Image: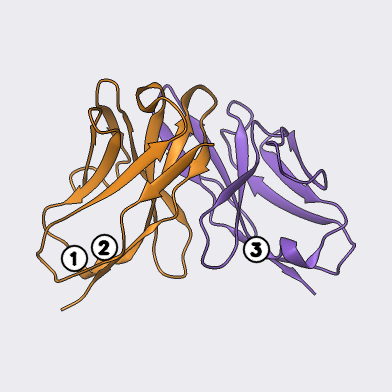
Chain colours: A purple, B orange
Amino acid sequence: SFELTQPPSVSVSPGQTARITCSGDELPKQYAHWYQQKPGQAPVLVIFKDSERPSGIPERFSGSSSGTTVTLTISGVQAEDEADYYCQSGDTIRTYWVFGGGTKLTVL
Amino acid sequence: EVQLVQSGAEVKKPGESLKISCKPSGYRFTNYWIGWVRQMPGKGLEWMGIIYPDDSDTRYSSSFQGQVTISADRSIGTAYLQWNSLKASDTAMYYCARLSYADSFFDYWGQGTLVTVSS
């Protein structure tokens, strides 16, 4: 099977840059996507296909990929960015989708 | 505007059956796969399965195969997630989401349906 590994938590001060990683052996072959989930709310797509940003998502959210690791970067973190972040990937040939375990971003 | 509206919260007893729904709007229902995602209390997201409403082609995660049934009624534009015999461990929030299949991401999500199973 296909697993994605994220750090459980990341903490940053307001205005700093937060980087959340996601690792998986299949990531060189498959796109990764990122979702933000605030308490009591449904997930929201913030990055798709490694580095593309949906309309309406602030420019401070960006994504990158290198080998078996993808990274979500939030530049100039704001208090409202405090949330859980999940990476996700999928294999349309094996018809398998998977989420990482999630990372809790704390804004100090 | 794309929206996915899910049915309301449910409280059930172990052994009971349940069918929850997801009704998308703002796009052609039969053109996109719909996925279901579980989130147990305080835990992460788990992919359960997907359905293509045009022909009801369905794929399940191995973790959920045989435990739930995913279906769709194209005549009323609604997708469903169903249990025949609930267990306490089915207590969770369940989300439906539209899947961009070719690129494998979920671009729009429902608000979630909380299912509580307790005797």
Q: Nearer the viewer, residue A91 or B93?
A: B93
- In the picture of the structure, the residue carrying the numbered disc 2 is B90
Q: Can you see residue A56?
A: yes
Quadrant (top left/top right/bottom left/bottom right) for the C terminus of chain A: bottom right
Q: Residue at x 61, y 30 (%)?
A: A31
Q: Are marks 1 and 2 in contact (CB under 8 Å)?
A: yes
Is residue B95 shown above or below B87? above
Left or right? Give the position of B10 relative to B41.
left
Left or right? Give the position of B87 relative to A12.
left
Q: Gap in Å between the C-alphas at discs 1 and 2?
A: 5 Å
Is residue B115 shown above or below B77? below
Left or right? Give the position of A16 relative to A2.
right
The quadrant where residue A82 appears: bottom right
Mark 1 surroundings within 10 Å by alpha-carbon count, few (fewer than 14), some (14 through 19), many (20 or more): some
Q: Residue at x 81, y 63 (%)?
A: A78
Quadrant (top left/top right/bottom left/bottom right) for the N terminus of chain A: top left
* Mark 2 chain: B
- Amino acid at dot 1: Lys
Which of the labelled discs sits on residue A83, or is there none? 3
Q: Nearer the viewer, residue A91 or B110?
A: B110
Position of residue A15 measured from the top left corner of the image (x, y, whole percent): 90, 62
- Amino acid at dot 2: Asp
- In the picture of the structure, the residue carrying the numbered disc 1 is B87
Q: Residue at x 9, y 65 (%)?
A: B15
Q: Between label 3 and label 1, give the one nearer the viewer.
A: 3
Dot 3: what SS? strand
State the residue lying farthest toward the bottom: B119
